[in-house]
Image: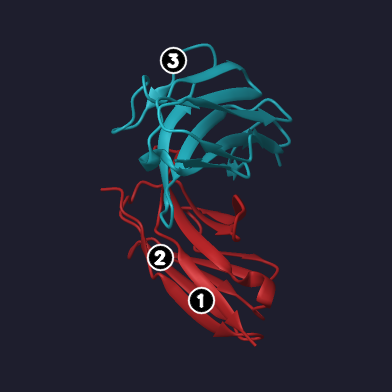
Chain colours: A red, B cyan
Amino acid sequence: GEDVEQSLFLSVREGDSSVINCTYTDSSSTYLYWYKQEPGAGLQLLTYIFSNMDMKQDQRLTVLLNKKDKHLSLRIADTQTGDSAIYFCAESIGDYKLSFGAGTTVTVRA
Amino acid sequence: SAVISQKPSRDICQRGTSLTIQCQVDSQVTMMFWYRQQPGQSLTLIATANQGSEATYESGFVIDKFPISRPNLTFSTLTVSNMSPEDSSIYLCSVRDRGLLGQNTGELFFGEGSRLTVL
């Protein structure tokens, strides 16, 4: 199957860490992605991880991959108001197509 | 990373008409895709735009409704034909880029999208 699931909403206080979770089903996925979509905008590639890695860090972003459980998470450290957006998890299908989750709406409150 | 420009960025269309969306990339890319994002929904792949040949459509999408062209490695068009209100969506072009050494990478980038409203 090609189902990607993620929670729909997350509310976090400014300055705290945000953790967005995602599960996927295709164990042969080569890459797993996190995209950010701000209101009225397209998709911005935040980060992606190769399936043979279990962690990737890029400034405030940390991606953890548990391939055994098919679980992917995105941690945003020191969350800012500009981080308010919809975050999409996606898995690669056949190495280049993407199957997306429904998106997690992250709201940062002061 | 590749810079992707889509036109139009938004449009309001009448039922029964057709609209062509253009996607221009600032470099040659190996693969180009068209996605649809219906209001409040996630993204669904419509088709892979193949250079010099017919596009490869996903289940539920057909060429008569969504004809696609890709005349070269930097440009593609998607036409939404005979539109109905159900076609109101954001249509996004996506590309797979090459790395600095010309190798395939995992990076897939999206344009800003074309927001269509069909009345």
Q: Are marks 1 and 3 in contact (CB under 8 Å)?
A: no
The kind of secondary structure element at disc 3 is loop
Q: Nearer the viewer, mark 1 or mark 3?
A: 3
Nearest the eye: B8 or A55:
B8
The subunit letter for the residue under badge 3 reads B
Residue wearing tag 2: A22
- Relative to B107, residue A83 above or below: below
Neighbor class of circle 2 (other Cα within 10 Å; few <14, some 14-19, many 20+) is many
In the picture, residue B36 is in which quadrant?
Answer: top left
- Relative to A101, residue B32 above or below: above
Nearest the eye: B42 or A45:
B42
- Relative to B13, residue A2 above or below: below
Residue B90: x %, y % from top left: 51, 44
Position of A36 with respect to A21 (left or right) is right
Name the residue type under label 3. Answer: Glu
Residue at position x 40%, y 69% from top? A8
The lab-note entry on whether marks 1 and 3 share a chain reads: no
Name the residue type under label 2. Answer: Cys
Distance, label 3 to label 2, CA atoms, is: 34 Å
Position of B79 with respect to A109 (left or right) is left
Q: How many marks?
A: 3
Neighbor class of circle 3 (other Cα within 10 Å; few <14, some 14-19, many 20+) is some
Residue wearing tag 3: B54
The kind of secondary structure element at disc 1 is strand
Residue at position x 44%, y 62% from top? A103
Distance, label 2 to label 1, CA atoms, is: 10 Å
The subunit letter for the residue under badge 1 reads A
Residue wearing tag 1: A19
Name the residue type under label 1. Answer: Val
Residue A15: x %, y % from top left: 66, 86
Residue at position x 63%, y 20% from top? B73
